[in-house]
Amino acid sequence: MSLTAQNIMITAKQKTLLNINNISLPENQITAIIGSNGAGKSTLLKALRGLYAHIAPQFNGQSVKEMTAHGKIAFVGQHEGFNTPLSVLEYVLLGRFPHLSWFAKPNRQDIENAEKILSDYELQHLINSPIQTLSGGEKQRAAIVRALMQETDVICLDEPCNHLDIRHQHKLMSDLNKRKQNNKLTAIIVLHDLNLSYRYADFIVLLNNGKLVSCGTPNKVMTSETLSNAYRWEIQQTKHGKHAIYFAA
């Protein structure tokens, strides 16, 4: 089973942002969407979340638009809003509200789960701090915790490694990999880092100028020749153990 979409044609100001006939992303895997600036990565993520009226993606036969409307797809964007008078704990508990009835509040189990994930993301010492006072990296991790608190089958993340140092980048990707294995999570992530993409993603979508260049396993898609053509810069690959390392020549 998978997340599928057809006839993805998106234009703005007479410019074609995306033109993809059809796409199918695997369930219970991590998909990385890669490509140069302006390739259409964030636009594709929006399309796959069902945010365009003329595009009707489905996840295992379910309407993604309905899933998104009912909070069944979690999302972390590039520009999350933190101008709210909430503590870090109160902020991440917002992720529970799709599961609550009107006027209901998170229960003790919700709070304990939030405290556990905050600890996993090394934010436990900031639990009572106003969310606005956190650093950029701390806010990004808090946004990820909020999304994880939704406990959805699908999570979409648009450049989630922005503002994160290298350790927290790997902690995030490792955590998503564990959740994929334990909770059957489907993660769709826009990434710029080719090394993170190769190491952690099961499935790669490579875009260039709004078109789908290639999709499949990292070994299939992320060849030096294919990447160099897509990024219009020579990209070389070397192997270190079971991982590939990419660098600009």
Image: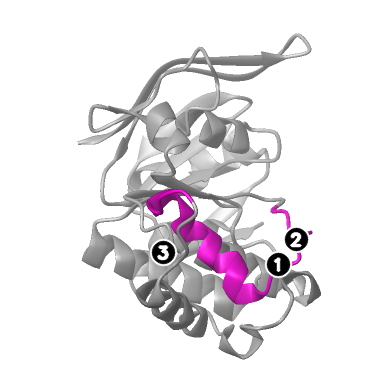
Pointer 3 residue: 199
Vertical comparison of 202 with 35: above or below = below
Mark sitting on residue 109: none
Vertical comparison of 79 with 128: above or below = above
What x and y, as percent, mark residue 218?
38, 50
What residue sits 46% from the left and 75% below the top? 114
Work out whether residue 188 can be spotted: no
What residue sits 40% from the left and 71% below the top? 107
User: Residues under labels 1 and 3: Cα distance?
Assistant: 20 Å
Q: Secondary structure at mark 1?
A: loop
Vertical comparison of 96 with 227: above or below = below
Residue 179 located left or right of residue 77 = left
Which is nearer the eye, 194 or 238? 194
**Amino acid carrying mark 2 in the image:** Thr
What x and y, as percent, mark residue 15?
73, 14
Q: Nearer the viewer, mark 3 or mark 2?
A: 2
Which is nearer the eye, 175 or 15? 175
**Amino acid carrying mark 1 in the image:** His
Q: Secondary structure at mark 2?
A: loop
User: Residues under labels 1 and 2: Cα distance?
Assistant: 20 Å
Residue at the limit of the structure toward the left, as seen here: 1
**Amino acid carrying mark 3 in the image:** Arg
Pointer 1 residue: 163
The residue range painted magenta reads 80-102
